[in-house]
Amino acid sequence: MISDTCMSTFCITVSRFTHSGCFTKTTVRSDNVVKSHFLPLIKPAASCPARPVCTMSEEKPSFPEGYKPQKVWTYTEQEGKMGGMNKPTAGKRSDEPLPVGDHPIQLYSLGTPNGMKCTILLEELGVEYDAWHIDIFQLKQFTSGFVEMNPNSKIPCMSDNDFTPPLRVFESGHILKYLAEKYGKFIPEDPRERVECFNWLFWLQGSAPYIGGGFGHFYNYAPVKIEYAIDRFTLETKRLLDVLDKHLEGREWVCAEYSIADMAIMPWIMCIYKFYNAAEFIDYASYKNVVAWVKRVEERPAAARGLRVNGFGDTAVKERHSAKDFE
C-alpha cells in the first residue's frame, strides 16, 4: 500500500509475519522494497496473545542452522549437477576454437529449452545449417572459441557466415528474432500482431529464469531440498502456467498465427515434465489449454525434428549438418 509522499520519494507499508509469530507493519522507503520482498514468508505461531512489537532488526532463522552471510561474500565451489560448473567470474577456462561447417548459419548449442527453441525455428524455416553439440557438463561453453562468440558463456549462440567477418548472435530470444527477420517468416507482418508476438517472446525471456533457475533448480537439481525455495518458485511457475492457460483459451496459437512466440515458450513448458519430472507435483494436466497447445506444437514435423537436434536420449541427433542426419 502506497502511503503519503515523504522525503522526495514514496514509502510503502509492508505487512508480514515474523518467525516468532508476530504480525508487523513496517513503513520502508521504496529503495528497500526489494529487500522486504524477499523476507521469509513464515507462517505465524498458533497463537501470539501478547502481540509483542517486533522490529526489522530481529534475527531471522537461517538454513543451514547458524548460517550468517559474510560481510563480503567469498566464493566456495558449489555442489550439485549444475552448481559445480558455476564461478563468479567470466572468461575462458581453456583454449579451443569452435568448429565451423559448410553452411552460413552455425549454431553452437545443446538440447535444453533455450537450444530447442532455436533448432525448432531453423527446421521450420527449412534452411540448411550446422548445429554443433556444446557439452556444458564438460565446460565447453568456457572454451576460448565459445567465449569469443558469446562472452556470457551460455548456450545457444550463433554465427551468420553470410557476413565477412562472420556476425555473432547470442541470447536465444535474439537468435529467434534475428533468424525470423533474416528469412522473413514466423513474425507477423501486421504491426499490432507483430507487437503482440514480441510481447509474448519477451514474456518468456523474463519468465524462463523462474521456471528453470528457480523451480527446476530447487525442485530437481539442487543438492538439498529447501521447502521455502521450492514453494516460492512452484507458486510462480504455476502462476505463469495459469497466465498462459488463460491466454490460450479459444486460441490455436499464442498469436493469431504460429510464430516464434510459440517456438520460444513451448520448450520451457515441456521442460517441466520432461526434464524436471514435475508433472504430477505441479498438476500440469490441469492446464488443459496449455497441454493441448504443447501437443499441437510437438506434432508439427519440423518442430519434432528441432526437438531432437543436440538433444538427449535414443532419438536425439547429436549434431545436425544436413537434413540427412534425421534419416
Image: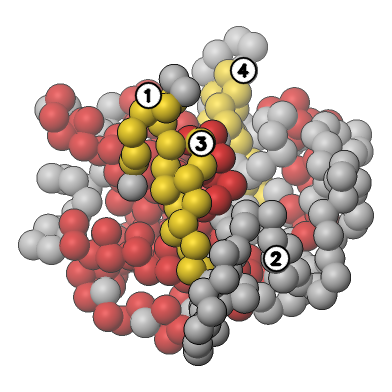
Cα separation between marks 2 and 1: 53 Å
Disc marking residue 145? none
Horizontally, residue 224 falls left or right of residue 275, namely right
Given contact means CB atoms under 8 Å apart, are the residues at marks 4 and 1 in contact?
no
First in residue order: circle 2 vs circle 3: 3
Kindly indicate the quadrant of the structure image that contains residue 217: bottom right
Quarter-wise, where is residue 100 in the image? top right
Q: Which residue is mark 4?
A: 166
The answer to which of marks 4 and 2 sits earlier in the sequence is 2
- Look at 49% across and 62% down and name the residue there: 24
Question: Is 155 situated left or right of 43 in this image?
Answer: right
Q: Is label 4 in contact with label 3 (beta carbons under 8 Å)?
A: no
**Viewed as shown, does residue 312 lie left or right of 267?**
right
- Residue placed most toward the observer, 184 or 266: 266
Type of the residue with mark 3? Arg
Amino acid type, mark 4: Pro
Task: Report the Cα–Cα distance between label 3 and label 1.
Answer: 47 Å
Which numbered disc, 3 or 1, marks the residue closer to the eye?
Answer: 3
Label 4 and label 2: CA atoms lie apart by 53 Å
Residue type of the residue flagged with mark 1: Lys
Within 10 Å of the Cα at label 4, are there few (<14), some (14-19), or many (20+) other Cα atoms? some
Q: Nearer the viewer, residue 30 or 177?
A: 30
Instruction: State the mark number for residue 60.
Output: 2
Other-residue count near label 3 (Cα within 10 Å), few / some / many at <14 / 14–19 / ≥20: some
Residue that numbered label 1 is attached to: 182
- Name the residue located 59 percent from the left edge and 47 percent from the top edge: 35
For numbered disc 3, what is the local secondary structure?
strand
Dot 3 or dot 1, earlier in sequence: 3
Marks 4 and 3 sit apart, C-alpha to C-alpha, by 49 Å
Check disc 2: other Cα within 10 Å, few if <14, some if 14-19, many if 20+.
few
**Could you classify mark 1 by the number of other residues whose Cα lies within 10 Å: few (under 14), some (14-19), or many (20 or more)?**
few
From the image, tell me which residue sits under label 3. Answer: 29
